[in-house]
Image: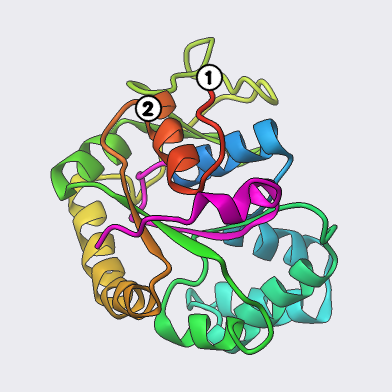
Amino acid sequence: MMVLLKKVDWVVQGDKMRLVFLGPPGAGKGTQAELLKKRYDYNHISTGEVLRQEIQKNTDLGKEVESYVNKGELAPDEIVTKIIKKWLKSLNNKKGIVLDGFPRNLTQAEYLEEDFSVDYVLYFDLEENEIVERLSNRLYCPQCEKFYNLKYNPPQNDNICDKCEKELIKRKDDTPEAIKKRLAVYNKNTHPLVKHYEEKGSLIHIDASKEIDKVFEQVLERIGLEETKI
C-alpha cells in the first residue's frame, strides 16, 4: 500500500515531522535516519543506542534493561517504551524526530501511541536474499558501534572505523544461518505492526534495494521534502 502525502501540509512543517523507520536488519534505516539528521537537523532515536546509554548511565531503567541483557533475554516492551518516551520528552520539540527500529511490535506501538503521535511510518522493503548478502558483508565497530557494508558503504581504510579508528569486526550473528533465524522472528513480529500502520493510513513503502542516495531521494519525495542530491 503506497500512501500519497498531502505535500501542502508540509511546506513549512516538513522538517518537523515525527517519523518511524521500520524494516528488516540491513535495510539501511540507520543510514537514512542519519542523512535526515545531517541534512535537516532531525533528532535520530536509535533504540539500541538509547538502551546502551541508559545502561552506561546506570539509571534505574538502565539497570532493569541490563538485568535482562545479562540473562540473554529481551527487555519487556513496557520498559523499552518507557525509556524511549523518556528520551522523546527530553528532545527539542522544534526539530523533527526519526524513531529508528522502534516500535518493533504491536505492543510497543500501542504503548507509544498512548502519548506520542506519529505522522508517517516508512517501511524499508528489501528481499530476503539481499538482506542476507548485505549482512554477510557487514563489519561492526565495537567502540562506537557503527556499521559498514563492504559493498555499499565501506570504511575509508580497510577494516578501520572512520569515526574512532578502531579495528572493525564481524558480528557472530551475521552469518547466513543466523540471519535467516533473525528474519523469521522479525517477520513474525513485524507483520501485525505493518498491518496496524496500513490501517491507520500512515505507512509508506520505500524500495531499499537501491543505492543509498537513490533511497534518500525516495524518502524526501515521500515525506514532501525537496529532492536533495547527496
Amino acid type indicated by mark 1: Ile
Location of residue 53 by image quarter: bottom right
Residue 70 visible in the picture: no
Residue reaching furthest top? 157
The residue lying furthest to the front in this view is 8
Q: Disc 2 residue type?
A: Lys
Q: Nearer the viewer, residue 88 or 200?
A: 200
Image-based side of 198 in relation to 32, left or right: left
10 is within the stretch colored magenta: yes
Q: Residue at x 57, y 87 (%)?
A: 111
Q: Is residue 144 above or below residue 84?
A: above
What stretch of residues is rendered in magenta?
1-28
Q: Considering only order in the chain, which callout, 1 or 2, is on the residue closer to the N terminus?
A: 2
Q: Could you say which disc has been placed on residue 166 in the image? A: none
In the image, 195 versus 140, the foreground residue is 195
Q: Position of residue 162 (x, y in %)?
A: 62, 20
- Residue 34 horizontal/vertical position (percent): 60, 38
How far across and how far down the image is residue 175, in percent?
A: 25, 45
Residue 11 sits inside the magenta stretch: yes
Image disc number at residue 214? 2
* Quarter of image, res 115: bottom right
CB within 8 Å, label 2 to label 1: no
- As drawn, the label of residue 230 is 1
| x 66%, y 65%: residue | 51
* Residue 12 in picture, x, y percent from top left: 70, 47
Residue under the point 47% across and 33% down? 169
- Look at the image and name its color scheme: rainbow
Crowding at dot 1, Cα within 10 Å, few <14 / some 14-19 / many 20+, comes out as few
Q: Is residue 183 left or right of residue 31?
A: left
